Image: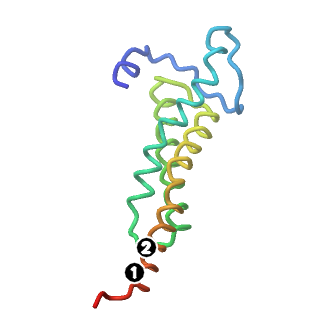
Amino acid sequence: LLVTVLSRDGTGSGGALELFRLPAEPGPRDEYPRMLLMNAFLFVPLGMSLGSSWPRTMPVFRCILYTALGGLAVTLTCELLQLITGLGTLEADDLVMNLSGVLLGMTHLPLSYGVRYLIARAAKHEVPAS
């Protein structure tokens, strides 16, 4: 990441707010689907860690909402910093793919809440050994 950021010359091209626009040059056009997937997978750990950081007493839907809002805030901050510093381009498809990575990362939340519920329910119905 450090090499990527420091190797840029600060001549970012502003912003591209058109969703999923293919680049005009033939080289980057071949890499475009891979770049989209890399943007999404880069934010999967953020969705996992943010989703797991909320208190266990919080309802799952509130955890999902707060995780999505936190992921949106982080990705929007990254894109705005790229626009302000000129070290990249603010692109709407990056925002969408980064947020989808956060959402993909937090898919474990409903599953973990369901497993926790089943374990607690089974513990209630346990018969003490005599």
Q: Nearer the viewer, residue 48 or 128?
A: 128
Q: Nearer the viewer, residue 30 or 5?
A: 30
Indicate the position of residue 70 as horizontal and vertical percent values: 48, 53
Indicate the position of residue 29 as horizontal and vertical percent values: 67, 15
Determine the CA span between mark 2 and mark 1. Answer: 6 Å
Q: Residues within 10 Å of mark 1 (few under 14, many from 20)?
A: few
Residue behind mark 1? 123
Residue reaching furthest bottom? 130
Residue type beneath disc 2: Ile
Check the picture and name the quadrant holding the N terminus: top left
Circle 1 sits in a helix, a strand or a loop, which is it?
helix
Q: Residue 54 vs residue 11: left or right?
A: left
Indicate the position of residue 20 as horizontal and vertical percent values: 70, 30
Residue type beneath disc 1: Ala
Q: Residue at left 62%, top 14%?
A: 28
Q: Nearer the viewer, residue 17 or 122?
A: 122
Evaluate if marks 2 and 1 touch, with contact meaning CB atoms under 8 Å apart: yes
Check the picture and name the quadrant holding the C terminus: bottom left
Q: Residue 67 vs residue 32: left or right?
A: left
Return the mark for residue 24.
none
Q: Residues within 10 Å of mark 2 (few under 14, many from 20)?
A: few
Return the mark for residue 119.
2
